[in-house]
Amino acid sequence: MTTETTATPQANRLRSILAGSAGNTVETFDWFVYAAFGLYFSKVFFPDADRTTELLNTAAVFGVGFFARPAGAWLMGLYGDRIGRKNAMVISVTLMCVGSLIIGLCPGKAEIGVAAPAILVFARILQGASMGGEYGVSATYISEMASRRNRGFWSGIFYSTLIAGQLMAMGVLLLLTAILSPEQMQAWGWRIPFFVGGALALAVFWLRRGMDETPSFQARQGPKATTWGLIRSHPRESLIVIGLTAGGTLAYYTYTTYIQKFLVNTSGFSKDQANLITAAALAFFMVIQPMVGALSDRIGRRAVLITFGVAGAGLTWPILSRLADTHDMGSAFLLTSAALLIVSAYSSVNAVVKAELFPTEVRALGVALPYSLANAAFGGTAEYVALAFKKAGNETGFYTYVTVTIAVSLAVYVLMRDTRRHSRIAED
């Protein structure tokens, strides 16, 4: 017979999962608004440069936010393992709110000089710390709240909520570009989504305060989480997280974030056309996450990850090469959707795989810190590396870089155990 400290009633469990998921959506919206509107505000903070250089500078700041993510992952992971998953998730959404409002209010370089890009960098550092902590703690929270038989499905839902936030950012972009002129978007329209994101984050702050703590955390035993304890006791698991993340996060940011710039800067589509193609492909990507996650509940996480590795390493070059040459929106949508179907074999299960690798007392830190290190190194730099290759006149070099990185992750998938059968989440 279970007690309240070891099991959460089903209704409360579902409510808490949905509350955590809603927070993921808002945090990801705030994070990706920067990428979605970069085409419009790049000149505000980095004037007097050619188009590729403007985007390169904007992408560099995007990358700075990623390099703040390991710090947030470290602090929030420790906090989540010591004080609670719920409390850490409340703090993370607060940081995201502050960062969004700072960007929305920041004057441009023409008004305050070099202070403008400096403030932009500071705001992205706050948002990066928030996202670094958010991913690890929320992935841990949802994995622990879900029942054993459908953790893959809820992992897919988890990633759907992340994509929903990105899709919301694209939706706001499409709406604003439909009702505002290009001059209005350039002058002030790009600020609107940052204010919207800040307001939504405040709403999530109150929503998360009412969530239940997970049964796993309530029943935890053993010493308090420490960074050295993670390194000393779980080096193999930490390296697995870094290895399985590298190729997946690079592919994810290539086809969900950089692809918008690629379609404009390489394929030759207009901004509006690129926005429509990207939004439609993201909608498809969002819908298939739970289905692929549920498949992993039947055939195992490892088999799904290997599928991503094989298809990603084999088809990245053909897909990007064909996209570079196409001028048909339908073809561009199909190619982008095909790429995202491949990526879904990573994205839908990666949260639960990482959570299943670690014991309760270091799970949030173990998920968050190695993931954030890999995400900063490969995901956060994806746009910058791609644009640097293009500026150097060797754009296909980026195709090779993505292919090789996915192949390295494939080796990790082949060698690791299936976490569905060897899960360290003991509670159901």
Image: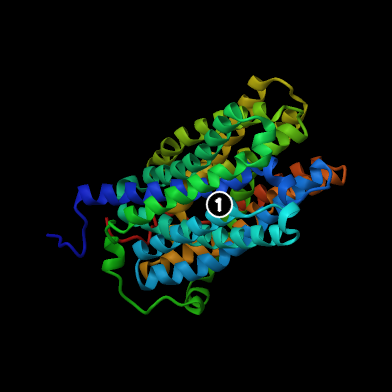
- Indicate left or right for 229 with 207 as reference: right
Residue 181 visible in the snapshot = yes
Residue 80 picture quarter: bottom left
Is label 1 in a helix, a strand or a loop?
A: helix
Q: Is residue 313 visible?
A: no
Q: Nearer the viewer, residue 164 or 398?
A: 164
Up-down relation of residue 200 to residue 255 (above or below): below
x, y (%) of residue 331? 66, 22
Q: Mark 1: which amino acid?
A: Tyr
- With respect to residue 187, does 94 lie above or below? below
Which residue in the rendered view is the most extreme toward the left?
Answer: 1
Residue 85: quarter of image: bottom left
Residue neighbourhood size for the residue with mark 1, other residues' Cα within 10 Å, grouped as few (<14), some (14–19), many (≥20): many
Residue visible at 45% across and 41% down in the picture: 160
Q: Residue furthest front?
A: 111
Residue 108: x percent and y percent?
A: 70, 52
Which quadrant does the C terminus fall into? Answer: bottom left
Judge from the rendering whether residue 271 lies leftward or rightward of residue 205; answer left or right: right
Residue labelled with disc 1: 413
Q: Position of residue 247 (x, y in %)?
A: 63, 50
